[in-house]
Image: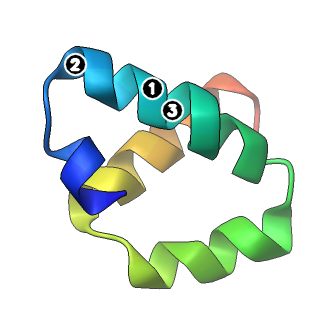
Amino acid sequence: MKKMALNDEKVQEVLIVSVLELLITERDVIERAKFHVGELTKRLCENVEKAYGF
């Protein structure tokens, strides 16, 4: 995920739609995953969480 997050905006969108949007509903999984991803991926995840009201 880290390499995807570091790519251009289109690749980041794929990461968000294909992985992060699915994971945010699994709260225990996403919280554990945040310990294993880079800072940019965490920020993308937090943006998605805010957008979905988490």
Q: Is residue 49 visible?
A: no
Would residue 19 be found to the left or right of residue 41 on screen? Answer: right
Residue depth check, mark 1 versus mark 2: number of the one nearer the observer: 1
Residue at image position (50%, 46%) is: 46
Q: Report crowding for label 3: few under 14, some 14 to 19, many 20 or more residues within 10 A (C-alpha).
A: many
User: Separation of disc 3 and disc 1 at Cα?
Assistant: 5 Å
Q: Position of residue 47 (x, y in %)?
A: 48, 35
User: If you read the primary sequence from the N terminus, does the residue marked by circle 2 or circle 3 appear first?
Assistant: 2
Badge number at residue 16 = 3
Q: Quadrant of the N terminus?
A: bottom left
Q: Amino acid at mark 2?
A: Glu
Q: Nearer the viewer, residue 30 or 17?
A: 17
* Crowd rating for badge 2 (residues with CA inside 10 Å; few <14, some 14–19, many 20+): few
Q: Position of residue 3 (x, y in %)?
A: 20, 54
The kind of residue tagged 3 is: Ile
| Spatial separation of the CA atoms under disc 1 and disc 2 | 9 Å
Q: Which residue occupies 27% across, 45% down?
A: 4
- The residue pinned by badge 2 equals 9
Instruction: Out of 7 and 24, give the one closest to the viewer.
Output: 7
Please tell me in which quadrant of the rendered image residue 52 appears.
top right
Q: Position of residue 17 (x, y in %)?
A: 59, 26
- In three-dimensional space, the C-alpha distance between marks 2 and 3, rounded to whole angstroms, equals 10 Å
Quarter placement of the C terminus: top right
Which residue is denoted by mark 1 in the rendering? Answer: 14
Earlier-in-chain disc, 1 versus 2: 2
